[in-house]
Image: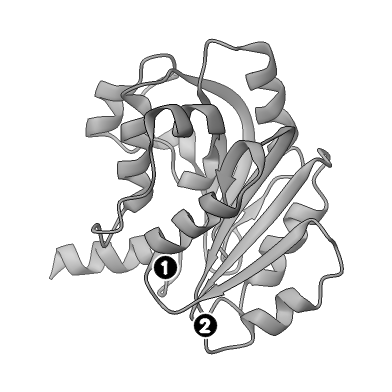
Amino acid sequence: MQPGLVSILMPAYNGAEFIRQAVDSVIVQSYPQWELVVVDDGSTDQTAAIIAGYPDARIRYAFQENRGQAAALNRGLALAEGEFITTLDVDDWLAVDSLADRVAYLAHHLEDGAVYGNGFYCDVAGRPLMRFSENRVGDVAGDVYATLIYTPFFGTGANVMVRRQVLDQHQIQYDESIVWCQDYDFYIRIAAVARFGLVHTPTVWYRLHAANMTMAMTKTRQL
């Protein structure tokens, strides 16, 4: 584990349409000490070629046969070398100070095992629709377990940064038996053992579109 390093886990499955914007948002981060671990979960499009076109040595790529998002994230965790862990989906993108703001918080709040921020839900073109904070009641921090059980107030898992030590100490990984909302389950289990801090600055833009997993889950429930 490298002190100060942020490992960004990016599970990718046929993400060629949006992945450049996601990767570019990592490259321009004001906090330079990061690694992007792209786990290609059996893509059949140009995902691999696009990632190969980036010369930045901080970008690491691994391919696996299609096993699902949770398995891809666990592969990323196994490869990650950072003190801090966060995620980024191929169709979302980070605010320029996303890593800096969350690392600074954790550096000054050793009592907290994780931190989350604000962000925006956006349409397919990237136009902001609403802030994550509009979808929760007040500021939720500290022991968030009970609140998180009833309300997934993070907006998206990419909004959260967790200390690797918490994951290792409590042997927390993604549950590969869960088809939907694996990140929600993941952070509930973290919240059971660690405090969460809050920064008010935006960390991530979360794109809503027809192929988005959360949107697909909503449609399934409506059926």
The three-letter amino acid code for the residue at tag 2 is Ser
Per the image, label 1 sits on a secondary structure element best described as loop
Establish if 189 lies above or below 63.
Answer: above
The percent coordinates of residue 205 (x first, y second) are 59, 51
The percent coordinates of residue 221 (x first, y second) are 16, 63
Dot 1 alpha-carbon crowd within 10 angstroms: few under 14, some 14 to 19, many 20 or more: some
Q: Is residue 163 visible?
A: no
Q: Mark 2 or 1 closer to N-term?
A: 2
**In the rendered image, which residue does mark 1 sit on?**
212
Per the image, label 2 sits on a secondary structure element best described as loop
Q: Residue at point 42% right, 68% down?
A: 212
Dot 2 alpha-carbon crowd within 10 angstroms: few under 14, some 14 to 19, many 20 or more: some
Q: Residue at point 69% right, 28% down?
A: 103
Q: Which mark is residue 43?
A: 2
Q: Is residue 48 visible?
A: yes
Q: Residue at point 19% right, 68% down?
A: 220
Q: Residue at point 75% right, 45% down?
A: 34
Establish if 32 lies above or below 9.
Answer: above
Q: Would you identify the image quadrant in which residue 161 lies? A: top right
